[in-house]
Image (tube, grey):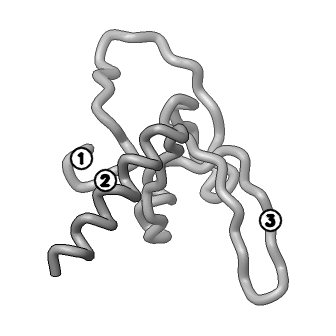
């Protein structure tokens, strides 16, 4: 299932006791390590969901995001600039 859902990650959960939580959207139990915090926006209304399971993230078609440190961001921008110049 982790192959089709990018929010599952590469963790092996078979023999590890993990901290469980409840998804704020569907109400199912889920591994807290796989939960994400998201802001759900519809029109002019918004709500912060502090614990959203991987299934809800995939079902609602959230796009995975990553936080980069300053050095990684600068390297990414340099790479994109070089790619634009080569066109």
Q: Are marks 2 and 1 in contact (CB under 8 Å)?
A: yes
Q: Are marks 2 and 3 in contact (CB under 8 Å)?
A: no
Spatial CA distance of label 2 from label 1 is 7 Å
Q: Secondary structure at mark 3?
A: strand
Q: Is residue 86 above or below residue 77?
A: below
Label 2 environment density (alpha carbons within 10 Å; few <14, some 14–19, many ≥20): few
Q: Nearer the viewer, mark 2 or mark 1?
A: 2
- Residue pointed to by mark 1: 1
- Residue pointed to by mark 2: 5
Query: Which residue ends up furthest to the front in the rendered image?
Result: 85
Q: Nearer the viewer, residue 68 or 58?
A: 68
Tell me what residue is drawn at x 83 percent, y 80 percent: 45
Tell me what residue is drawn at x 72 percent, y 46 percent: 50
- Residue pointed to by mark 3: 47
Q: Quadrant of residue 49?
A: bottom right
Tell me what residue is drawn at x 34 percent, y 21 percent: 13
């Amino acid at each position: 299932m982790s192959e089709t859902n990018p929010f599952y990650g590469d963790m092996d959960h078979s023999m590890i006791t993990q901290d469980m939580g409840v998804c704020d959207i569907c109400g199912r139990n889920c591994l807290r390590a796989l939960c994400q915090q998201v802001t759900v926006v519809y029109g002019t209304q918004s709500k912060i969901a502090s614990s959203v399971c991987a299934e809800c993230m995939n079902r609602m078609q959230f796009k995975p995001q990553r936080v980069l440190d300053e050095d990684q961001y600068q390297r990414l921008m340099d790479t994109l600039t070089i790619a634009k110049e080569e066109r």
